[in-house]
Image: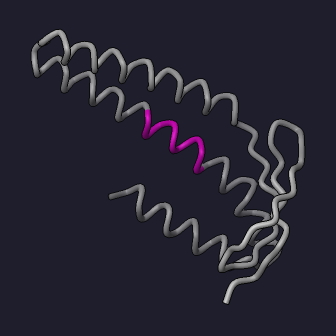
Amino acid sequence: MSNLHKHPHTHDGFTHDHSSDHPHSHSHTHTHTHTKAVINRLSRAIGHLESVKRMVEDGRDCSEVLIQLAAVRSAIGNTAKIILKDHIEHCIVDAVESNDVAALDELNKAIERFMH
């Protein structure tokens, strides 16, 4: 059984209400203070990954490619840390204050998937 609810999101200073059909019923507002930093980091990681792709296309040394892939993976991991910190500081604090157990379960599932 799922509950239809409004799910407000605050993004770049604007709040958007989305009707959604979720199997849980949390209704905290998502406020993300590091969105621009995350987007910038992702853009850099995408550019870096594109350059690694070109390295492979150009037949560059496998060791060099692996080193660069490790750097991209590290950049993505560091970006994920920013997202997680932001989520905990805002969304999870709000979820705990409103006794939103579903949001905590979702966080645990996301961490579990990310760590594998």
Q: Position of residue 91 (x, y in %)?
A: 73, 59
Q: Where is residue 116 in the image (x, y as percent from the top left)?
A: 32, 58
Magenta part of the protein: which range? Answer: 76-84
The residue depicted at 49 percent of the width and 20 percent of the height is 44
Q: Is residue 28 left or right of residue 79?
A: right
Residue found at the very far bottom of the displayed protein: 1
In this rendered view, identify the residue nearer to me: 23 or 36: 23
The residue depicted at 45 percent of the width and 25 percent of the height is 46
User: Quarter of the image holding residue 29?
Assistant: bottom right
Q: Is residue 90 left or right of residue 85?
A: right
In this rendered view, identify the residue nearer to me: 96 or 16: 16
Coloring basis for residues? one colour
User: Quarter of the image holding residue 88?
Assistant: bottom right
Q: From the viewer's perspective, is residue 102 above or below residue 86?
A: below
User: Where the N terminus falls, by quadrant?
Assistant: bottom right
Q: How many marks?
A: 0
